[in-house]
Amino acid sequence: MNKKPNPFLEKGIKKSKFLNEDKSMTIKGTYNKTFILLLLLTISFIFSWNKIDSLSQTMIDDSAGLRFILIIGVTTSIVLAFTTIFKPKVSPITAPMYAMTEGALLGFIVKCTDLSYPGIALPAVLLTIAITISTLLLYKSIGPINKKIVTGIIIATVGILILNLFSLILSLAFGIKIPLYKGGIIGIIFSLLVIVIATLNLIVDLDSINELAYYGAPKYMEWYSAFGVLVTLVWLYLEILNLIQKLKEN
C-alpha cells in the first residue's frame, strides 16, 4: 500500500531528515501501534464492563454517582485527546493513556446501554469490525484519495460535531431533543449518514498514514496516527451502537 500520495505534502515534511527507518514512521509500525492501542482499549473496556456488572442495582440506579463517574471519565479523555492532538511528540505516552481511559469510559457507557437494551453491544462490535475490514480492503484497492474529497469529509465531520454540541446544549439546558437523535425514521437515516461519514474518516486516516510514511515523518507520528485511527473506530462503534438502539426502539 506504499502508493505515491499527495505531492504537496512533501513541502511540509522533509524526507531527507528521517532516512533512517529507526527514526522515521512506517505503515507497518503504525498498524502495530494501532493494534497495541486497540488491545489496551479492549482490556480496559472489559475491566470497566465487569466492574459495572458487579455493582448492586442500588448503585446502578444512583444516577448522581454514575453521572459523576461519567464526567470524570469524559474530562480525562478530552484532556488526553487534546494534549495528543496539539502535542504529537508526547503521543507515545498520551495515546496509550487515552486508549485505557477511553476503554474504561466506553465499557461504562456500553454496559449502561446494555442494561436497557440487552445484547446490543456484540452486534455493534461485529459490525464495526466488518466495516473496518471492508474499508481497509477498499483503500488497498483504490489507493490515495482526492484532496477535495478529503476536504469535503472534514467539513461534514466538523458539521456533525457542531450539531452534536448544539444538541447537547439544548438537551442539558432546555430538555429539548432534536428529532435527528430520536428513534424515528429521520433519526435512523441520520445515524446511517453519520456512520458513512465516520467510515469515510477511516479512509482519510489510512490516507494520512500512507502520506506521512511515504515522506518519512518522525517515528512518534506512528503513535499519533494510531491515536487518530482509534478515535475514528470508537466514534464508528458508538454510532453503530446508537443506530441499533434506535432500531430496537422502533
Image (tube, rainbow, N blue to C red):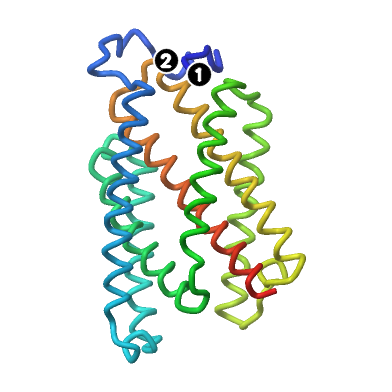
**Left or right placement of residue 3 versus residue 28 in this view:** right
245 to 85, vertically: above or below: below
x, y percent for residue 37: 31, 44
Between disc 1 and disc 2, whose residue precedes?
1
Q: Looking at the image, which residue is at 61% across and 57% down? A: 162
Question: Which numbered disc covers residue 110?
Answer: none
Question: Which numbered disc covers residue 9?
Answer: 1
x, y percent for residue 43: 27, 55
Judge depth for marks 1 and 2 and give the one in front: 2
Distance in Å between CA atoms under marks 1 and 2: 8 Å
Q: Are marks 1 and 2 in contact (CB under 8 Å)?
A: yes
Residue linked to disc 2: 215
Q: Looking at the image, which residue is at 52% across and 75% down? A: 117
**Mark 1 surroundings: few (<14), some (14-19) or many (≥20) residues within 10 A:** few
30 to 78, vertically: above or below: above
> Toward the viewer: 188 or 174?
188
Q: Looking at the image, which residue is at 49% across and 30% down? A: 206
x, y percent for residue 200: 60, 39
45 to 3, vertically: above or below: below
> Toward the viewer: 116 or 175?
116
